[in-house]
Amino acid sequence: MNRIKKGDRVVVIAGKDKGKQGDVLSLDGDRVVVSNINIIKRHTKPNPQAGQPGGVIEREASIHISNVMLYNPASGKGERIAIKKLEDGRKFRVFRSSGEAVDA
């Protein structure tokens, strides 16, 4: 079970966007794409078959999963995650500091 999932609110803890918050748009192995974080510019050719215009396009690049922490709205900062197991075998995520379950 991953500690960070798609749709989670995260805080960047390292890099040029340190301290910023965003939602996880996608996961690919140990890389995550976070909304409005690590914006890059790409010069692209137009592709009429895909309906893609040409020019300079800004989009989010991926960052390593170790550079983000799950945001805890109760404390207002990023916190570490533990995975607990119920008696029937189901797993769920909890914040290590308070032990409360992650709402996701």
Image (cartoon, rainbow, N blue to C red):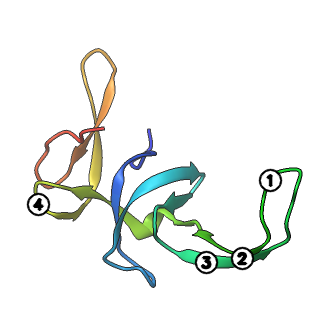
Q: Are marks 1 and 4 in contact (CB under 8 Å)?
A: no
Q: Amino acid at mark 2?
A: Arg
Return the x and y of residue 18 as percentages of the image width and height.
Answer: 36, 80
Query: Could you say whether the residue bearing mark 4 is in a helix, strand or loop?
Result: loop
Residue on which the image places disc 4: 75
Task: Say above or below: 28 vs 58.
Answer: above
Q: Which mark is residue 42?
A: 2
- Please give left or right for residue 54 compared with residue 62 in the image: right
Q: CA distance from mark 1 to mark 4?
A: 44 Å
Query: Could you say whether the residue bearing mark 1 is in a helix, strand or loop?
Result: loop
Dot 2 or dot 1, earlier in sequence: 2
Q: CA distance from mark 4 to mark 2?
A: 37 Å
Dot 1 or dot 4, earlier in sequence: 1
Task: Say above or below: 53 vs 103.
Answer: below
Query: Could you say whether the residue bearing mark 2 is in a helix, strand or loop?
Result: strand
Q: Residue at x 89, y 50 (%)?
A: 49
- Please give left or right for residue 66 compared with residue 49 in the image: left
Q: CA distance from mark 2 to mark 1?
A: 17 Å
Q: Amino acid at mark 3?
A: Ile
Q: Which mark is residue 14?
A: none
Q: Which mark is residue 40?
A: 3
Q: Residue at x 77, y 64 (%)?
A: 53
Q: Amino acid at mark 4?
A: Ser
Q: CA distance from mark 2 to mark 3?
A: 7 Å
Q: Are marks 2 and 1 in contact (CB under 8 Å)?
A: no
